[in-house]
Image: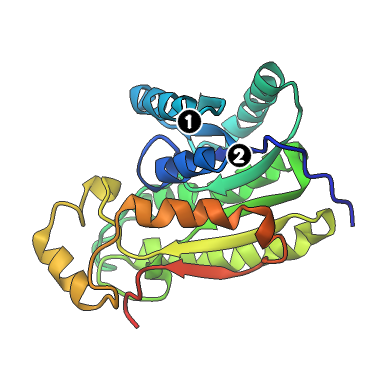
Amino acid sequence: MSIELTASPRIALVTGGSRGLGRSTAINLARRGVDVVITYHTNRAEADSAVAEMTTLGRKAVALQLDGRATSSFAGFAETLRVALRDNWGRDRFDYLVNNAGTALYALITETTEAQMDEIYAIHFKGVFFLTQTLLPLLSDGGRIVNISSGLARNTYPGSSVYGSMKAAIETLTRYMAKELGPRGITVNVVAPGAVATDFGGGRIRNSPEMQKMLVGVTALGRVANAEDIGPMIASLLDDANHWVTAQRIEVSGGQGI
């Protein structure tokens, strides 16, 4: 087994790192001494704000545009990342990949369209699969990958059938990645957040007192999470102390639905 994880500072790539859980993960990685590349889809101002916050923590940070659905753009993105690594760090590899970017879908099975399903599949499974595949030559041996699932892969709520099913697929994919990338010393795990009050899905949980009340009632710790309940845990999973943890599903839900 070849172990070639680079010396400090480590470099992480966090997709969808301009807001929500991705931003919290990126900021907490910076707090732990990791330099960060984040991706954003359309909101450059939010991405620049996240970069500025990480810079104030004394870390190098870069924001790159990426549409996680557009697999045809991934080769070009990899080249852009290669240039960014060279120009900012004098390196040709990065150490950690967090596949976080995604969108929501709330629709009953009887109401879901093929176009809606294709959209969720494209960003939550196909995009994760092929982006990871494309970036593997740039990921250091001995590195880390964290995929993001959801408590909805375990708990069922009407209207989340497609989203929850795609996240269940990511959990299976994580185990296969861990098996196939193990010879390179790369660990692959999946984190499954429970309900989180962010702007995800248009702020559906954040903006609904009724939904929050229902979720509080089925959560052992008695409240709905915020991004800072999740981001630090994802960042900690990338630490060297967890080098022997791989192929695992880790739910971070405050005991939701137990």
- Please state, as top left, top right, bottom left or bottom right, where the N terminus lies in the image: bottom right
> Which residue in the rendered view is the most extreme toward the right?
1
**Image point (82%, 53%), residue name:** 184
Placement of 222 over or under 45, stated as above or below: below
Q: Could you classify mark 2 by the number of other residues whose Cα lies within 10 Å: few (under 14), some (14-19), or many (20 or more)?
A: many
The amino acid type of the residue labelled 1 equals Leu
Q: Are marks 2 and 1 in contact (CB under 8 Å)?
A: no
**Image point (58%, 38%), residue name:** 33
Task: Tell me where residue 193 appears, x and y as whole percent.
Answer: 40, 62
Q: Nearer the viewer, mark 2 or mark 1?
A: 1
- Please state, as top left, top right, bottom left or bottom right, where the C terminus lies in the image: bottom left
- Can you identify the residue that label 2 sits on? 12
Any part of residue 67 in sight = yes
Task: Tell me where residue 125 appears, x and y as whole percent.
Answer: 52, 54
- Can you identify the residue that label 1 sits on? 57
Label tally = 2
- Disc 1 is placed on an element classified as loop
Task: Tell me where residue 171 appears, x and y as whole percent.
Answer: 55, 66
The amino acid type of the residue labelled 2 equals Ala
**Image point (29%, 78%), residue name:** 220
35 vs 220, left or right, is right
Task: Tell me where residue 159 appears, x and y as whole percent.
Answer: 26, 66
Instruction: Give how far apart the Cα atoms at labels 2 and 1 are.
Output: 15 Å
Q: Earlier in the sequence, mark 2 or mark 1?
A: 2
48 vs 135, left or right, is left
| Of residues 145 and 54, the one drawn nearer to the viewer in this rendering | 54
